Image (cartoon, rainbow, N blue to C red):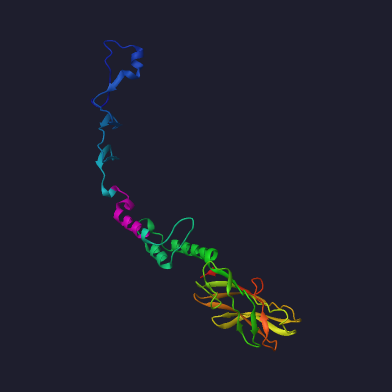
Amino acid sequence: MANEFKHTDVGDEITKAEYHSTTGHEADGQAAGDLLYCDGTYWKRVAIGANGLYLKAAAVPYWEAILEADIPAAIARDAEVTADIAAHAALAITHGATDAIADQADIAAHAALTTGVHGVGANYLAYTKASQKEALFHNNYMARAYLSANQFDVPNNTGTLVNLNAESYDPGNNFNTANHRYVAPVAGYYVIHGQVTYLTGTVVADKRYDARLYLNGAESGGAILASPTTGYASPNFTDCLHLAANDYVELFCFHQAGVNTVDILGNTNWTFLTVMLLQAD
């Protein structure tokens, strides 16, 4: 029967060696690239397939053209995936080692993509918010400002703004040395530490000397020191406050020395305010 194997012509007699030889048989009608399969009784041939066909098997194997129904759904949505990729490229957002995050609008736009490879939704949004908080803490939202020269003649029994006019650091440019305040760039919990040092020789013994924290122009905390001598007096405080975006904090002084000639020491080590974002909302 055609398409099987047949013996090669060895003449009228066959030796044992010729009988067992692998060259003693030859194809009967098959061409290069053909496939053979057994139908349970005979060996049969499937001719080599043409480009664009793929091998399928039902009761017997056969070649068939590729149909859209046989393509995975993610590949069939080619145009849809392309549109998502274009939308992703348009976002002003960086995915990489820096985890730099743009603004909430971009994050929301990314999370809203629900087709193709972008069906990430709330999980991705939660990740980007966490990355944003980390970036805020490590990069921008901290500052330290100090009084660079003595501030003279602080009035008695009067809350007085300390004119912090120089900075040790302020990577986010959030401390304004013109109006001597730190403005919160984002809502969150901030650790705040302040100190006021009253100048020796201008201090009246056994009187009250304060370092005060003001929030949005109103007293919000601080520290009180009753100096037993006329030497330096350095009340200081540490607090953690929740600030809304654009809230501002200031360092104030206050004394009850009974005179208007008390001075504040201007020095980076002795009269200063530090602010650092602990956790963003």
Direction from residue 13 to residue 177 in the image, left or right:
right
Q: Nearer the viewer, residue 72 or 190?
A: 190
- Residue farthest toward the right in the current orientation of the protein: 229
Direction from residue 66 to residue 277 in the image, left or right:
right
The residue lying at 26 percent from left, 33 percent from top is: 48
The residue lying at 37 percent from left, 58 percent from top is: 89
Give percent across and percent down for residue 263: 67, 81
Q: Nearer the viewer, residue 216 or 26?
A: 216
Give percent across and percent down for residue 113: 37, 61
Task: Let me know if residue 252 appears in the view.
Answer: yes
Picture quadrant of residue 107: bottom left
The residue lying at 49 percent from left, 64 percent from top is: 132
Work out whether 274 lies above or below 208. above
Give percent across and percent down for residue 156: 66, 88
Magenta span contains residue 124: no
Q: Which residues are magenta?
A: 70-88
- Residue farthest toward the top in the current orientation of the protein: 13
Q: Quadrant of the N terminus?
A: top left
- What kind of secondary structure does the magenta stretch mostly adopt? helix
Q: Nearer the viewer, residue 10 or 168?
A: 168
Give percent across and percent down for residue 155: 64, 87
